Image (tube, rainbow, N blue to C red):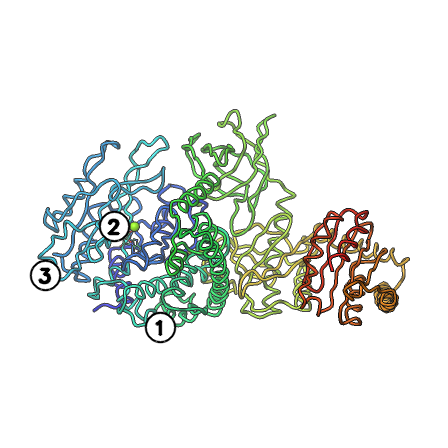
Amino acid sequence: MLTAKETRKSFLDFFASKEHKIVPSAPMVVKNDPTLMFTNAGMNQFKDIFLGNSPRVYPRVADSQKCLRVSGKHNDLEEVGHDTYHHTMFEMLGNWSFGDYFKKEAIAWAWEYLVDVVKLDPDRLYVTVFEGSKEDNLERDEEAAEIWAQFLPEKRIINGSKKDNFWEMGDTGPCGPCSEIHIDLRADDERAKVDALTLINNDHPQVIEIWNNVFMQFNRKADGSLEQLPAKHVDTGMGFERLCMALQGKQSNYDTDVFQPIIREIGKICGYEYGKNEQTDIAMRVIADHIRTIAFSITDGQLPSNAKAGYVIRRILRRAVRYGYTFLGQRQAFMYKLIPALIDSMGEAYPELIAQQTLVEKVIKEEEDSFLRTLETGIRLLDKVMNETKQVNKTEISGKEAFTLYDTFGFPLDLTELILRENGLTVNLKEFDEEMQKQKERARNAASVETGDWVTVREGETEFIGYDWLEADVEILRYRKVKQKNQEFFQIVLNKTPFYAEMGGQMGDTGFLTNGEEKIEIIDTKKENNLSIHLAKKMPADPTATFRATVNLEKRQQTANNHTATHLLHEALREVLGTHVEQKGSFVSPDALRFDFSHFQKLTDEELREVEKLANKKVRQNFSLEENRNMPIKEAQAMGAMALFGEKYGETVRVIKYGSSVELCGGTHVQATGQIGLIRIVSESSIAAGVRRIEAVTAEKAEELTYIQQDILKEAKNFFHNTPNLLQAIKKTIDENAETKKQVEDFVQEKIVQVKNALVERATTNLHGIKVVVLKGNFPADFVKSVAFQVRNQLKEKMLFVGGTEENNKPILTVALSDDLVAGGLNATGMIREAAKEIQGGGGGQPFFATAGGKNPAGLEKAVEIVVNLV
Ligand code: ATP
Ligand code: MG
């Protein structure tokens, strides 16, 4: 029986024997494509080749690609755990032809691999072909059907609809028919009873698709019509975990050696055995699946967060925590404990897991802890809502409440329902759905982008010349209109461009395209599928003209200062803190820089100072830029350059070196470090467990910062008559102030005693033998309170204190009672409510002491009288 590891290898070996170049998996988290957050198919990393933006490097390629299907076009999240063959993250085995072989070879090799190499039973295999489509004016894919017929009987070649058997990259772009291979894994007796043909594409857990072969032969235009592609391509994808299930004779992906080590560990930690109960099994599958996704996205550089890709990862983690919480009784963080088991099963194929184990565990544990706290807050809130519902004799809580819980507190609907059910309540699902719909609409409106077709001005390829030139004569190759949030932009592609397109954390260049009098502003430059796209608010009158392209020089220089400073700070951090410091993110703009790195505690002031000094020393050493645009990656690493996990590198890389700082980097940099002038770190903070962030400024901005600080100092000295020793003067003032405060305090205490004594002396006794003490005049509220308490202390029985005082022209009414009167039924709070009407105010307190503020000082006299008469 083939193990998972052997299976992966056999696939790659097979296609290597068919002259395919075996390439590594691209990162699962996509960094430089605004249209995609995660790799969701093997073909993603080759998109630019299919679109014709980049030339192919090899005509035939094969790999095993980490994929994630949790958002956008492919979202399997809700299935995962409930069924046995969809995962969030999975490996897709694939082979590609870029304008090389087509259907004949692709189909024959797929069959040869499955039947001859890994020896699947051919009688259990079924295939689908595209049946054709009227609206697209397309016939059935007879070509594929005829080739398949050489390998299996006609009746197992099934027609598939446009939905299942016509693949499209997006609304526009390359597309074509596809052929899926399905397998029937049921026992023989069941197969005899029910024909697999009735179960294909019908969500049967043992009759499933394992491999899809896409034949790209058309291009879809924005008006919906199709045109033939000049070069035809093959794109295939086979689910690795599903193949393992078939080869290991299992009924579920989770029963294979890919998942079993993790499932066993979950069982051990939670005290449940897998296979005994459907509900706990689902929970264990969810957790086993999600821990892979979370761990791999963290090693790919995507931490859980509250926006975009980070938020998707956070929600997946929370889904797992919730299943653990609800079905496996986990009230404490536990998922992070699964990482060693995950490393056991996948660490060898994916060494980044081993290298970043500590970080992955810390991040997951912190996320778990924080979500468990959220769950508790949610449960408390839900308790409140349930009580209120029961009080008004209802059994249904509103969908709005459930939605708030879901949206604001991350409290999932099914958990809300579960808790409600335990309390004999339900939720209004219709209302909930309406709220959800409204929110989706809001999100859609915010995100919707309409892109028009490319208008070709002239054929040609684009070339980046911005490392050497900031100005050049250029021509427009093509452009298109883009509408987002009701704003119209134009995306322009040039034959050559000095504009740097946003990448690797460095912002894109801005500037102008000029032709005579006409000046078109370039507001940003971005990369899309490896193509530099210039953003403009309007198009030039004559797009066919030649333009002078000019990059905003000042911004470019400031950006270069900040980018080079980032390299120097990176090196300094590793020197001061240790080599565990690894880049986790960076952002470089003309104004400032931000650098995120792994480190497990807060930097001390001394460490920060040392880092800053070290970096500035390198500035003064004025190292010249040593740039190599085409160095084999092995050679670059031998020089000391670090490849970042989660970055996609070609076989040759660009190396940027200043002194001993060596980095793989595509950014723009200074000619010599002296140009930076000065680097100042302005903040240090934590952005996740084990990840710190520093922010810094350079050159003029650093200079400005020192001026601001200097001005503050000068101003402060002015307050102290330009004393030569500012610190001493401040310290002296603070001490004096404290002393004065203490004296005032003592004085007030004395005064309280004096007032109390005078009042007690003047106290009158009413008909019931109660001593009535009245205070009037201007006093602060807490002064009155202290007097009242002291009177209470002295006259312990049959005592009523009434204060009718003013503070800054605001009336205050105060009532205090001795304990025996309270025991006898009097209540200061009640009395104050009665009387406070006179001063147009309100208040409250306890039965023995209450106060009220008001608006009408003229009513004080009357209010006091009312209180006195109440006893
Ligand atoms: P399905 O209908 O089973 O969801 P699909 O049509 O979405 O599959 P493709 O997009 O053609 O699948 O992907 C190619 C192959 O990747 C599939 O044949 C299958 O083996 C595998 N695959 C797809 N989605 C998943 C998933 N969520 N988990 C594991 N494997 C998957
Ligand atoms: Mg699918």
Quadrant for the C terminus in the image: bottom right
Q: Earlier in the sequence, mark 3 or mark 1?
A: 3
Rendering coords of residue 303 (x, y %): 48, 59
Q: Residues within 10 Å of mark 3 (few under 14, many from 20)?
A: few
Numbered disc in front, either 2 or 3 = 3
Q: Type of residue at label 3? A: Asp
Q: Type of residue at label 2? A: Asn
- Asked whether disc 3 touches disc 1, contact meaning CB atoms under 8 Å apart, the reply is no
SS for dot 1: helix
Q: Which residue is mark 2?
A: 212
Q: Label 3 to label 1, Cα distance in Å?
A: 35 Å
Rendering coords of residue 592 (x, y %): 63, 51
Rendering coords of residue 674 (x, y %): 68, 55
SS for dot 3: helix
Residue at the spot 16% in from the left edge and 58% down from the top edge? 115
* Whether residue 731 is visible: no
- Which one is in front, 484 or 440? 440
Q: Label 2 to label 1, Cα distance in Å?
A: 33 Å
Rendering coords of residue 285 (x, y %): 32, 63
Q: Using residue 474 as the reference point, say whether residue 841 is left or right of it.
A: right
Q: Earlier in the sequence, mark 2 or mark 3?
A: 3
- Which one is in front, 643 or 135? 135
Quadrant for the N terminus in the image: bottom left
Q: Which residue is mark 1?
A: 265
Q: Type of residue at label 1? A: Glu
Q: Which residue is mark 3?
A: 189
| Disc 2 residue lies near ligand 1 with CB under 8 A | yes
- Asked whether disc 2 touches disc 3, contact meaning CB atoms under 8 Å apart, the reply is no
* Whether residue 785 is visible: yes
